Image (spheres, rainbow, N blue to C red):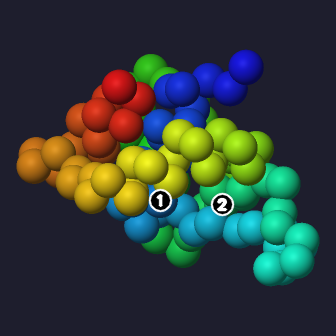
Amino acid sequence: MFDPRTLAIGVGCFVKGWAVLDFPGSTRANPSYQVYVQKSSSTPQTLPLGNGVFQFPLIVPWDIWQYIVVPIFAGGFTPPEDGSFLSLVNVLEA
């Protein structure tokens, strides 16, 4: 089972511009079976997670990405107004 909090942190990093996505070996004829969420040049040294722990890269199976993450953005996701990373992660986890 994939941990929802870990997924929310990885997607939150992407939303904040702290992570980039990679679809290794992906082509139209042969889509990748995994999505890699990797550090970007603007990733903070320490993520503001409170007591949480998170490590890059986050490797997400394609079906979880397709059926959980894609609908969030397709539905017009708007980040929380307070701009807090923890608020963003909490909204994504819910």
Residue 94, horizontal then vertical, whole percent: 35, 25
Question: Which residue is found at the position 58% from the left and 68% from the top?
Answer: 20
Residue pointed to by mark 2: 38
> Residue at horizontal 54%, vertical 74%?
41
Q: Do the numbered discs 2 and 1 sit on residues whose CB atoms are within 8 Å?
A: no
Q: Position of residue 10 (x, y in %)?
A: 54, 46
Q: Residue extending furthest bottom?
A: 28
Side of 81 where 77 appears, left or right: right
- Which residue is drawn at the image coordinates 63% and 66% (left, top)? 21
Residue marked by disc 1:
14
The span from disc 2 to disc 1 (Cα, nearest Å) is 9 Å
Q: Is residue 32 left or right of residue 10?
A: right
- Give amino acid for label 2: Gln
Give percent across and percent down for residue 64.
65, 40
SS type, badge 1: helix
The type of residue carrying mark 1 is Phe
